[in-house]
Image: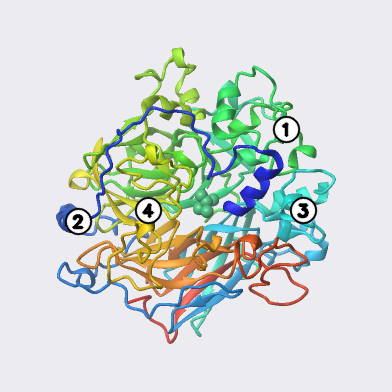
């Protein structure tokens, strides 16, 4: 979700519910106030040396010994001597208009869009006659994370898709403004509309195939097709399952919950499951908050009740005074087997409850555990790591299926000396005791944020994706922005006050050990326009005027270990640039060079970058096209269903803008950007 819609919403009820508004009340500085500009020429060279050493330390082919991971290394493209970017393509021009644009020599084709039929009995999309029942069989709204699960290598597979939220003003005819759409007012949002919204959330699994002409299409009547919604039955597993704080009237066991909501980014595991992350779960609950309720501190810390959706007027469980434990059943990472459409999704409570952005993981080369990273997407919140107790057993799927139920969750604390530590969140250790309201590990996990506050974790500039490069083992943290950081709050790892543009932090584990208690860190790039001195950006000077970006949100590594970034925030138009996809060098003398590959239509952010193992197809999710009309200077007013700023991708007068998945391929075939 981005700034404008939130700003509108805040104007309505003044709630602190936004990624760009702080709900972290802690004040203790955790690093000190030394300002260290960590990325200068010396740092670039140090990073280069570290990566070379680390790559050498990784057992050859370790990741490939997984199941679906990287293809052959092509280190020659990233030699230390080269001053050229590892990415070979002609950049797209930065800018903003109603359409999308792709680098020359590539095709960007629409694969599937909101409302397209998914299930065999689905009705065709009719935006003037949408109902919950129809929507539940069709592709959902605001596609975010994408995971590709092979059926036949890189030519046929399953695409798992998150449907994060609904841009309600663009979903339904008749809503006059963004404020009306986000008002949670039952006079404006009817029961039928709320039902559509609930069915437009969740996820989809679609079978897709690449034809002889090189073009991708959805396989109709696939036995794998699945829609997951805000009402799909799910199992709660791990230490918080069955705890009293997880029980409701409808579920006295505390082990069954209906639906997943606000699923932002996620990950794919080496054993072939989809992990999908519940993010801004506070938006779905209505108040008032009962005075003195035992969950008061918990609610406050995560921004409950968010009062953004009207669902609670029609469904009791979304009203906190009626069902105060229901919010505790959201904010988790959900694991789903995309190959079995009858399988029950599992909310893995061992991984903690917060506003999870993503859940990218790596098998630890030093111990064989699965190590999963997750950012808590709000300004001044934290980055977490989960290390499984058990080890990944390559090739034995069943033995890995419950690995995520046991392990150690830790939170990151950064030092000004270029090192950071992972602080374990374990009941009974340090401050995580009854004195602070924790009676069990379940309590620690349900209130992960408050537990992390007590440990002195480092507040970061809106942590989104956190992902390890499978080739080098180095870990990258996307920090989207934090305009709320004041000059006296800057520190080494968040070096800019009023950080509108975000930055990327790189972690280097010692000898490749992803479970290590301490790692080294440095800043890879500070984002924004490098030609404006006051912005303080520092891309590699090889970066062109189109190549720089702001607001990194998602990242992905291709089979060559090259990093791709998708952004959320350029659409705010303070730069006159849409969001999009950028390629970012991490190795060699070109480290820190960024190149613009794909540009989104106005109002959209780009999510879910995901490449097939053969690197010939790049899937991306274009989320909320036409949102934020006021932020696009050329439009300058609210953008609604009846009067949208763009009708991408159909451009038909009777069709609204539609969030869509785009398949990018090279004209004539071949690997992307090689
Ligand atoms: Fe849903 Fe963190 O963006
Ligand atoms: Ca986002
Ligand atoms: Ca995101």
* Quarter that holds the C terminus: bottom left
State which mark lies toward you, 2 or 4.
Answer: 4
Q: Which residue is mark 1?
A: 319
Left or right: where does residue 558 sit relative to residue 626? Answer: left
Q: Quadrant of residue 487?
A: top left
CA gap, disc 3 and disc 1: 20 Å
Q: Which mark is residue 503?
A: 4
**Of the pair 102 and 663, the residue shown nearer to us:** 102
Identify the element where label 3 is drawn. helix
Given contact means CB atoms under 8 Å apart, are the residues at marks 3 and 1 in contact? no
Q: Could you tell me which secondary element the residue under label 1 belongs to?
A: loop
Q: Mark on residue 51?
A: 2
Name the N-terminal-most of marks 3 and 1: 3
Q: Is residue 450 left or right of residue 496?
A: right
SS class of the residue under badge 4? strand
The residue that appears at 26% across and 49% down in the rendered structure is 37
Ranked by sequence position, the earlier of labels 2 and 4 is: 2
Q: How is the image coloured?
A: rainbow
Whether pointer 2 and pointer 4 mark residues with C-beta atoms closer than 8 Å, the reply is no
The image position of residue 164, as x and y in percent, is: 59, 52
Q: Nearer the viewer, mark 1 or mark 4?
A: 4
Q: Is residue 361 visible?
A: yes
Residue 28 placed where, x, y %?
38, 27
Depicted 61 relative to depicted 312: above or below: below
Disc 4 crowd, CA 10 A, few/some/many (<14, 14-19, 20+): many
Q: Which residue is mark 3?
A: 132
Query: In the image, is the residue at mark 1 within 8 Å of ligand 1 by its beta carbon?
Result: no
Q: Quadrant of residue 375?
A: top left
Q: Which class describes the residues within 10 Å of circle 2: few (<14), some (14-19), or many (20+)?
A: many
Of the numbered discs 1 and 4, the one sitting upstream in the chain is 1
What's the residue at 69%, 62% (across, down)? Answer: 637
């Amino acid at each position: 979700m981005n700034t404008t819609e939130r700003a509108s919403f805040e104007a309505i009820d003044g709630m602190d519910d936004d990624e760009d508004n702080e709900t972290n009340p802690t004040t203790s500085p955790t690093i000190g106030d030394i300002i260290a500009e960590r990325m200068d020429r010396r740092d670039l060279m140090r990073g280069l040396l570290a990566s070379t050493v680390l790559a050498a330390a990784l057992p050859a082919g370790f990741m490939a010994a997984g199941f679906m991971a990287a293809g052959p290394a092509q280190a020659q493209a990233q030699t230390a001597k080269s001053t050229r970017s590892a990415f070979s393509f002609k950049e797209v021009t930065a800018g903003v208009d109603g359409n999308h644009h792709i680098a020359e020599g590539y095709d960007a084709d629409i694969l599937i869009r909101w409302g397209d039929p998914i299930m065999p009995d689905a009705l065709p999309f009719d935006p003037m006659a949408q109902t919950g029942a129809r929507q539940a069989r069709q592709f959902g709204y605001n596609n975010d994370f994408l995971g590709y699960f092979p059926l036949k290598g890189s030519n046929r597979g399953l695409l798992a898709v998150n449907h994060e939220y609904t841009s309600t003003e663009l979903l339904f005819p008749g809503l006059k403004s963004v404020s009306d759409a986000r008002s949670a007012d039952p006079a404006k949002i009817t029961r039928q509309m709320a039902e559509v919204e609930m069915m437009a959330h969740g996820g989809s699994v679609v079978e897709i195939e690449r034809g002889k002409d090189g073009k991708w299409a959805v396989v109709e009547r696939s036995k794998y097709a699945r829609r997951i919604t805000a009402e799909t039955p799910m199992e709660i597993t791990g230490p918080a399952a069955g705890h009293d704080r997880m029980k409701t009237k409808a579920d006295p066991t505390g082990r069954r919950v209906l639906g997943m909501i606000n699923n932002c980014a996620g990950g794919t595991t080496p054993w072939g499951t989809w992990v999908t992350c519940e993010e801004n779960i506070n938006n779905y609950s209505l108040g008032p908050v009962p005075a003195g309720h035992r969950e008061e501190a918990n609610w406050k810390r995560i921004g409950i009740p968010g009062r953004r959706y009207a669902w609670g007027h029609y469904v009791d469980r979304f009203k906190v005074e009626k069902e105060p434990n229901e919010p505790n059943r959201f904010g988790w990472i959900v694991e789903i087997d995309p190959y079995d459409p009858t399988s029950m999704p599992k909310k893995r409570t061992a991984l903690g409850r917060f506003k999870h952005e993503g859940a990218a993981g790596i098998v630890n080369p030093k111990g064989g555990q699965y190590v999963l990273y997750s950012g808590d997407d709000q300004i001044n919140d934290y980055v977490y790591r989960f290390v499984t107790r058990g080890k990944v057993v390559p090739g034995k799927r069943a033995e890995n299926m419950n690995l995520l139920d046991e392990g150690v969750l830790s939170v990151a604390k950064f030092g000004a000396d270029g090192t950071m530590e992972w602080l374990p969140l374990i009941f009974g250790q340090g401050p995580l005791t009854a004195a602070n309201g924790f009676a069990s590990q379940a309590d620690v996990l349900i209130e992960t944020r408050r537990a992390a506050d007590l440990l002195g974790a480092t507040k970061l500039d809106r942590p989104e994706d956190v992902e390890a490069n499978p080739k080098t083992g180095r870990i990258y943290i996307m920090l989207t922005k934090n305009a709320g950081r004041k000059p006296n709050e800057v520190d080494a790892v968040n070096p800019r006050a009023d950080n509108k543009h975000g930055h990327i932090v790189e972690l280097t584990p010692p000898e490749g050990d992803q479970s290590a208690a301490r790692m080294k860190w440095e800043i890879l790039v500070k984002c924004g326009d490098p030609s404006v001195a006051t912005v303080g950006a520092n891309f590699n000077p090889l970066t062109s005027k189109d190549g720089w970006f702001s607001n990194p949100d998602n990242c992905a590594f291709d089979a060559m270990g090259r990093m791709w970034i998708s952004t959320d925030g350029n659409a705010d138009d303070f730069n006159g640039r849409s969001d999009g996809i950028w390629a970012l060098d991490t190795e060699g003398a070109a480290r820190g060079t960024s190149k613009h590959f794909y540009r989104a239509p106005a109002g959209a952010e780009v999510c879910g970058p995901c490449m097939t193992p053969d690197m010939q197809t790049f899937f991306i999710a274009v989320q909320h096209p036409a949102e934020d009309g006021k932020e696009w200077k050329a439009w300058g007013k609210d953008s609604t269903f009846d009067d949208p700023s763009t009708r991408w991708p159909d451009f038909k007068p009777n069709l609204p803008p539609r969030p869509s998945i785009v398949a990018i391929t090279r004209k004539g075939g071949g690997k992307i950007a090689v």
